[in-house]
Amino acid sequence: MDGLRAVAILLILVHHFHGPLHEYYEFGPLGVRFFFVLSAFLVTRGFLKARRRCETGKSTATGEFVEFEKRRLIRIVPPYYLFLAIGTALAIVPVRETLGWTLPLLTNFYMAHIGDFPPVISHFWYIAVQEQIYLVWPWLILLIPFTKLRPVFIGLTVLTLGFRASCIVLGASDYVRWFNPVGSLDSFAIGGFLACLSLEKPRLLDRTSTRLWTGLLALAAILGGHFLRLLPLQNPWSIGSELLEATGIAWVVACSVVGFRGWPGKLLASPALVYLGKISYGIYVYHVLVSVLFDAWASSHHVVLGLNLRFAILTVITVAAAALSWHFFETPILKIRKKTTA
């Protein structure tokens, strides 16, 4: 899974840093969709196991939810707030002016409110949407009977498509459509559906022949999602872009359950990708700040770089910053958390 996280974060870096092939494909939205599906898959599987503890009287739904939120906050908040602290200390105007929205994890609603991508902080919409959905998601998994979960996930997917369609009909801002949590529920529903399916049929994609034809369908879905993304947002077909991408990504996640074979498996299990996946959250949080500071320095020193060289430098600096944060800031906090709960 860390290898998959590494792939997702690299897609986002290529998009935001204008890396190789960025002009041919919108890698950033695909990377974010990757994180949504993968996160929903893992969280849903975790809470399906928590259900068993609740059913045997070893735990309660409330206790599982509170513990989940504690773990998420201790993982998500420290690097996020460190970014805001650094941005505020450096007098970066967009950071200072939006603290009322970013501190309580409401960046997505701020972007929908102003109808724009505010510089420096706009990438926080993903974190905000995810945390808002996770205020409700655990209760669905814990309280709805297992046999009813997959129909619920299908219903949530239909709800999401209906929401996007209503945005077109009502002339709502594109930013409302993109950054409202309901607009991303289909990615979570697909991840949740896959989690349920993987527990019932853990060897679902074990056969090579099955992987081949389903893989071709997954590739077609991802490419189809990209094609729909290129359509004007007022086009009704555009509402299916995220759904197709998430469906294709689900195939990749499903294959990871039984393990990739051959060179893809070796690549995803390589120490470099596993490490990048481990620090991927820090990379996501800090990468825009790195870009802003580096470009300001380059401009003040009249340094002009080619896109590929700029991409390489920004990627190296971002990974270094995330690594330092992981080892000297995030990990000590996580260790304190473990000690206090031991």
Image (cartoon, rainbow, N blue to C red):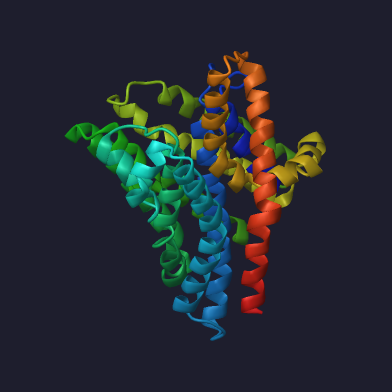
Q: Nearer the viewer, residue 285 or 301?
A: 301
Question: Which residue: 22% across, 35% down?
Answer: 172
Instruction: Tally the numbered discs.
Output: 0
Q: Is residue 86 left or right of residue 230?
A: right
Q: Nearer the viewer, residue 142 or 72?
A: 72
Examine the rendered structure and indicate whether residue 214 appears above or below residue 86.
above
Is residue 193 visible to the viewer in this orientation of the structure?
A: no
Residue farthest toward the left in the current orientation of the protein: 170
Q: Nearer the viewer, residue 153 or 47?
A: 47
| Residue 164 point in image, percent of width and height | 30, 38
Question: Which residue: 58% across, 65% down?
Answer: 46
Question: Which residue: 48% across, 45% down?
Answer: 89
Q: Nearer the viewer, residue 2 or 257?
A: 2
Q: Quadrant of residue 241?
A: top left
| Residue 193 point in image, percent of width and height | 50, 53
Quadrant containing the C terminus in the rendered view: bottom right
| Residue 32 point in image, percent of width and height | 51, 39
Q: Quadrant of residue 41?
A: bottom right
Examine the rendered structure and indicate whether residue 302 appears above or below residue 150.
above
Question: Which residue: 52% across, 35% down?
Answer: 288
Is residue 299 visible to the viewer in this orientation of the structure?
A: yes
Q: Is residue 115 left or right of residue 13?
A: left
| Residue 280 point in image, percent of width and height | 63, 45
Residue farthest toward the bottom in the current orientation of the protein: 57
